[in-house]
Image: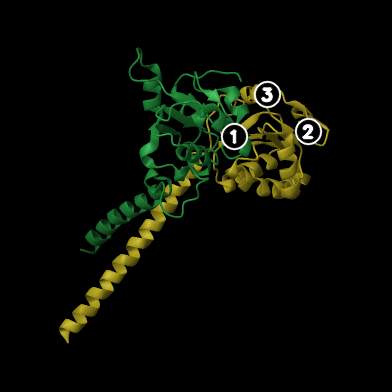
Chain colours: A yellow, B green
Amino acid sequence: MNKAVNGTTTAGTHRSVLRRLVGYALLIAAGLGAVTAHTCLAETPLISKKAPELVRTDLNHKRVDINAYRGKVVLLNFWATWCAPCQLEIPRFVAWQSQYGAQGLQVIGVSMDDDPALVRKLITKLKLNYPVVMGDEKLGELYGGVLGLPVTFLIDRNGEIRAKFQGETDLNAIDMQLKSLLNHR
Amino acid sequence: MQCSLISRSAMYAALVAALLLACPQSPAQFSGPGIDSSSAYSVPQTQLLQAEALNHLLQATGSTPAKPLVLQVGSHVLFAQAHIPGSEYIGPGSQPEGLQQLQKRVASLPKKKFIVLYCGCCPWNRCPNLGPAYKLLHDMGFTNVKVLYLANNFGTDWADKGYHVEQGR
């Protein structure tokens, strides 16, 4: 009887330890995952500087001048049709443009594709509700070198760059910063 | 005793967590069954070249070791901003035009030619260009093809490390 009780207790202890082990593993993984996501917040000498000049005609033939959005918070997203993580982000940007537009958000897309025809197709497919201009190496260099995608800048109402995100990013982190900038008038 | 159990289990948990986190990005997953050939993961691990090793090769003086033919199979706009000195722009390996251009470029080369492919458009596990480009050269019979492993992108894993770059198309 004692053996049985002891056996049950031992098995119970093992199960408990196992549960604890899995629990710790998940916690640590989540914690490290969060750290990994934060590493997408990239350093750049452009932080707290005025956003470099960006005057282009978008794919709907309308003029886009980043200085004309002074007073708004701008989310400037460099992307391309061949960039898989970019296409994961875009639906969130579309949702934010709808959700936060009235509070003063303006999303602007910069496609780093070579062929605008491919970009037009994707704009239609993903139902983009914000302007998209074609980028090039000159624009990339102005923004500190866009040598890998996606890259997203958050620009405050005064036209100053407040954050740069590069690579696969935790979109909730962008959302938090965005809300903070939108609340700051 | 309970504390000891907890601390030991916490240690194991950390190990498990580290493994869980490391696995999705580990090159050890390359070329396993069921891996899509359009993924960079389809490139065999043995064919990967680290940035430091390529930089060393390119900086070496003299005729040995032999300098590779370095081909960029990604975005032209990114190539124009910065590329490996001496490398040639081919076109995106994810698109038929890029693969045609690659086939044309290597058509007259000996099958033992040392070729290095690179892209760096986006995180390694998301790059659509390297898998198809490597597969094409492999299927054409090239036996000395390496693929530059850039975990994040060309900016972070090459330019930001201080390795030389050139600009222009």
Badge 2 amino acid: Asp
Please tell me the numbered disc located at residue A52: 3
Q: Position of residue A145 (x, y in %)?
A: 58, 25
Q: Nearer the viewer, residue A55 or B127?
A: B127
Name the chain under label 1: B
The quadrant of the picture occupied by the C terminus of chain B is top right
Badge 3 amino acid: Pro
Q: Position of residue B29 (x, y in %)?
A: 39, 48
Which quarter of the figure has residue B151? top left
What is the C-alpha distance between the residues marked 2 and 3? 17 Å
Q: What residue is disc 1 on?
A: B100
Badge 1 amino acid: Gln
Q: Nearer the viewer, residue A72 or A110?
A: A110
What is the C-alpha distance between the residues marked 3 and 1? 38 Å
Foreground mark, 2 or 3, reads 2
Please tell me the numbered disc located at residue A156: none
Q: Secondary structure at mark 2?
A: loop
